[in-house]
Image (spheres, rainbow, N blue to C red):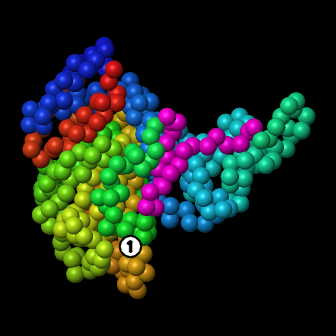
Amino acid sequence: MPMPEHLFDPAHYAKARLPVLEAETLPPWCYTSQQFYDREVERVFKRSWNFIGREDELPKAGDYAAYDLVGEPVLIVRDRAGTLRAFANSCRHRGTRLLDSTGNRRGIICPYHGWAYGLDGKLIGAAGMEETHGFDKRAYGLHPIRLKTWDGFVFINLGTGSVGLREYLGDLPETLDSYRLSDMVCVRRREYDLACNWKIYLENAMEDYHTPYVHRQSIGAQHTVPEKSHGAWGGIHMAAEKTIAVLAEDLAHALPPIPSLKGKPAAGTYFLVLYPSTFFALTQDCMWWLQQFPQGPARTKVVIGSCFPRATVARADFAEKVGFYYRRWDKSLPEDNAISERQQAGLRSSFASPGRLSVREPMVRDIANWLLDRVLD
């Protein structure tokens, strides 16, 4: 299907706007075009609150983590007062990337010319600049990036004009209140580098049509009951069963349920999308997230983070039993990874065209429309 000249003309997407059982999927170029991806970066990712990780992943003063979010190098640091801060991961001298990966530092030293910054981002040393006319260290601290937290989850915003995080989240904190997410601990973080568009992975996470086929050797068929979309997030409630996050054959090794659950969380499982690019799964015993860090129109880094209540992590048998949870994720996630890459490969075909949606894919339509509301002219 050829890409049109005027890519962001709403007429090209009219059929994606129809009710789910009448709608078509997004055109293939939405998953393959650099031009469409660049518009997503500018109008979606740089104007949204982006989930980045958990506070407990950086527990001590000096702990840091470096991220790349849609081409922006970002540095998260815990300062000496215990506050998490976010900065552009770029030296104020000549732009060198300051830190990589994760670790702990007493300060931040540029590897190029030795400019030194405190954990609060202030420039504290610039040897060799003494003769530069009018140079004032106070004007050359690291560029700050907006950072806010909710129940231990860390979010950053690359823009300046959007709403606050709590307004962005809407009623999500109240909906998930009984999980006591602030009392959870991230016990493992695993990354995958995939040859697929970020939307492909998110759409796959938010529909159960694929589960009896893609996951027939692991978790098998799942049946969910969709709920209304919620603005910054959309939820799907699995009312049919109380899910424990291990494979069926490992149920004897399950850890205890979260004791505070009540209402719908006590009766089933929440799978939800936290726009723009994060999936949350909340079961009876734990929660996990899937973050999509777009690397371009056809490449995505996917991160899975696994969280359990502190009391569960403190159990003497936790190290033994959590291995069965890892077994489930390490079996089912590669299945999702492989099918997402196969979908991307198929969408490169010049014959690829929009398809139709089943009754089991309402969130695929909702994700598309949330995106179109932001990228179209």
**Where does the magenta region start and end?**
139-161
User: From this viewpoint, which residue is outermost toward the right?
Assistant: 131
Q: Please report the residue visible at 38 percent of the width from the left and 65 percent of the height from the top.
A: 181
Horizontal and vertical percent for residue 362? 16, 43
Q: Please report the residue visible at 31 percent of the width from the left and 14 percent of the height from the top.
A: 6
Q: Amino acid at mark 1?
A: Pro
**Is residue 194 in view?**
no
Q: Please report the residue visible at 22 percent of the width from the left and 39 percent of the height from the top.
A: 366
Q: Please report the residue visible at 60 percent of the width from the left and 58 percent of the height from the top.
A: 83
- Looking at the rendering, in which quadrant would you find the C terminus? top left
**Is residue 19 in view?**
yes
Q: Is residue 144 magenta?
A: yes
Check the image and report above or below for 69 versus 36.
Answer: below
Horizontal and vertical percent for residue 18? 14, 30
Check the image and report above or below for 177 versus 297.
Answer: below
**Secondary-structure class at tag 1:** strand
In the image shown, does 269 or 174 lie closer to the viewer?
Answer: 174
In the image shown, does 347 or 171 lie closer to the viewer?
Answer: 171
Res. 361 image quadrant: top left
Mark 1 surroundings within 10 Å by alpha-carbon count, few (fewer than 14), some (14 through 19), many (20 or more) = many
In the image shown, does 143 or 340 lie closer to the viewer?
Answer: 143
From the image, tell me which residue sits under label 1. Answer: 309
